[in-house]
Amino acid sequence: MIEDLAKIKDMVKVLLTRHEIFRKNDEYLILEINAIYGYAKKLTHIKYGKGYFIPESLVRNRKLIKFESIRRVRQKLQEEFPELRPDEKSYKARQKEAENMRLFIK
């Protein structure tokens, strides 16, 4: 498990370094990581554009890499390496949303 998490951390760091979209959007990051590991398929369709496909059996059998693990790795990397954070506007919006959630939970 720890070895897998280290591999995921390395892959998330590469994606955050190379592609700004993954810094801003956890859903894209999660889908891309699952595609890299073979759990999701990237699709390109002339009429419908680009997207991802995740077979229902993988979802039902919980074979996907855990979304929360990927999000936490991204969060920790962005804490350690400020250059991997999204633009300032997106970063502040994410921080405000997190603070609102903490206040709501109390």
Image (cartoon, rainbow, N blue to C red):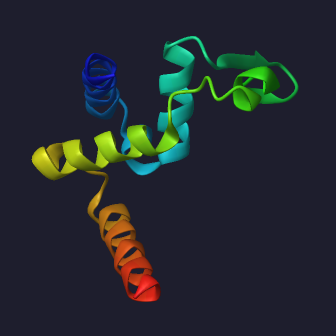
Q: Quadrant of the N terminus?
A: top left
Task: Indicate the position of residue 60 as horizontal and vertical percent values.
Answer: 76, 30
Please, which residue is most extreme toward the top here? 38
Task: Indicate the position of residue 98 as horizontal and vertical percent values.
Answer: 37, 72
Task: Indicate the position of residue 102 as horizontal and vertical percent values.
Answer: 37, 80
Kindly tell me whether residue 92 is visible in this rendering.
yes
Q: Quadrant of the C terminus?
A: bottom left
Tag count: 0
Along the viewing direction, whichever of 67 and 79 lies nearer the viewer: 67
Along the viewing direction, whichever of 9 and 106 lies nearer the viewer: 106
Seen at 47% across and 25% down, the residue is: 33
Q: Quadrant of residue 105?
A: bottom left
Seen at 17% across and 52% down, the residue is: 79
Compared with 20, 45 (above or below) is above
Seen at 71% across and 25% down, the residue is: 61
Kindly tell me whether residue 51 is visible in this rendering.
no
Task: Indicate the position of residue 24 as horizontal and vertical percent values.
Answer: 41, 50
Compared with 4, 79 (above or below) is below
Compared with 54, 87 (above or below) is below
Compared with 98, 57 (above or below) is above
Seen at 66% across and 18% down, the residue is: 42
> Does 41 sit left or right of 47 as displayed?
left
